[in-house]
Amino acid sequence: MKEQIEKIMAELSELKCQTEKEVEEARVRFLGKKGEITALFDEFRTIAPDLKREFGQRLNSLKKEAQTRIDALKASAKSTTVSADSAGDVTMPGDPYELGSRHPVSIAREEIVSIFRKFGYDVAEGPEIEDDYHVFEALNFPPNHPARDMQDTFFVSVGHPNPLLLRTHTSSVQVRTMEKMQPPIRVVCPGRVFRNEAISARAHCIFHQVEGLYIDENVTFADLKQAILLFAREMFGADTQIRMRPSYFPFTEPSAEVDVSCNICKGKGCNICKGTGWLEILGCGMVDPNVLEASGIDSKKYSGFAFGMGVERIAMLKWQVNDLRHYFENDMRFLSEFSSAVNV
Ligand code: PHE
């Protein structure tokens, strides 16, 4: 019996099982009703009483060892079985990868830019961190104009005669273009802009603009109106009407704000246009001669117009989105709605 116990002990320590099935077979072999260890316990009843104590202890520890060994093998077989199955089962559904799509703000920006490209405009870009001169000074902002106030502008440096700031509009790119080029100038300036505003359904501290500038001899307000009308019809549909309301910008004179006829109710009045039949899309005007002169362009010889629009606003009107914040939340359910909207 002693040899048998030792033999089983040795076998147990060398026992190897790959699968749960093999572990179960080993358990039956050693500990099952007709198992080798169970058989030793039966034999134990027949041995001489003076040997019982010694063999009882040996048998108990053998049984314990077998149970521990089998439990351990079972646990490791389980973990390897799981990974072997998941790696090997080719019928399992794959991990879903959601197909991305262009962001609606990108789609709208590209559409706006491509319309003006068709009209012969180039694209100009400039820095997002600008200086006061290019954002305000060169654009005829009087020194105490409210837009220079800390309320609207994120300053990067203060206490400097020409502080650095985050541009509040891309008109700064128009200034940089005029500094570099002589007319004829025809550019659109798409880009990100920053204003220190509370975030709401209608406003955000970061948004996108496309501004435009056209300077040549004999450019008139009629040219401006025609350019905006053609743009509005390309963007919102061939039957779109525009109207211009007098407005004020330091860098244009005269200045106007432009509304388009509501493309949802066709001018009848709905909750998107707040019952007016009109939607405001952009600001524009004839470039102030002071602005031309500040950048080295002869205002006696040349005239021009400028306009600027918010890309999110155009996108909201085009796709009837009622909350600007959707554009910044990256919710796939919202973004995927636009996967088929690319038509440029
Ligand atoms: N720069 C103006 C703004 O950001 C828009 C504008 C551009 C108005 C050009 C008139 C002419 O609000």
Image (cartoon, rainbow, N blue to C red):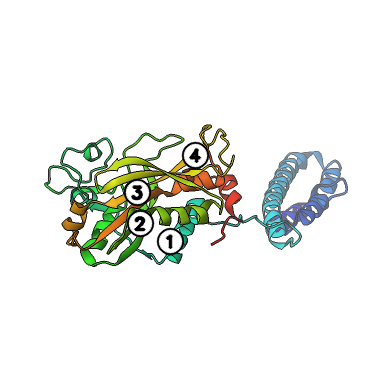
Q: Which mark is residue 212?
A: 2
Residue name at image x 70 percent, y 59 percent: 84
User: Can you see residue 32?
Assistant: yes
Q: How many marks?
A: 4
Disc 4 versus disc 1: nearer the observer: 4
Disc 3 versus disc 1: nearer the observer: 3
Using residue 266 as the reference point, say whether residue 169 is left or right of it.
Answer: left
Q: Are marks 2 and 1 in contact (CB under 8 Å)?
A: yes
Residue 292 % position (x, y): 21, 57
Alpha-carbon span between mark 4 and mark 3: 17 Å
Respond yes or no on whether mark 4 lies under 8 Å from ligand 1: no
Q: Which SS class for mark 3?
A: strand
Amino acid type assigned to the residue bearing label 4 in the image: Trp
User: Can you see residue 330?
Assistant: no
Q: Which SS class for mark 4?
A: strand
Quickly name the residue at label 4.
278
Amino acid type assigned to the residue bearing label 2 in the image: Gly
Counting residues from the start of the chain, the first of labels 4 and 3 encountered is 4
Alpha-carbon span between mark 3 and mark 2: 9 Å
Q: Which SS class for mark 2?
A: strand
Amino acid type assigned to the residue bearing label 3 in the image: Cys
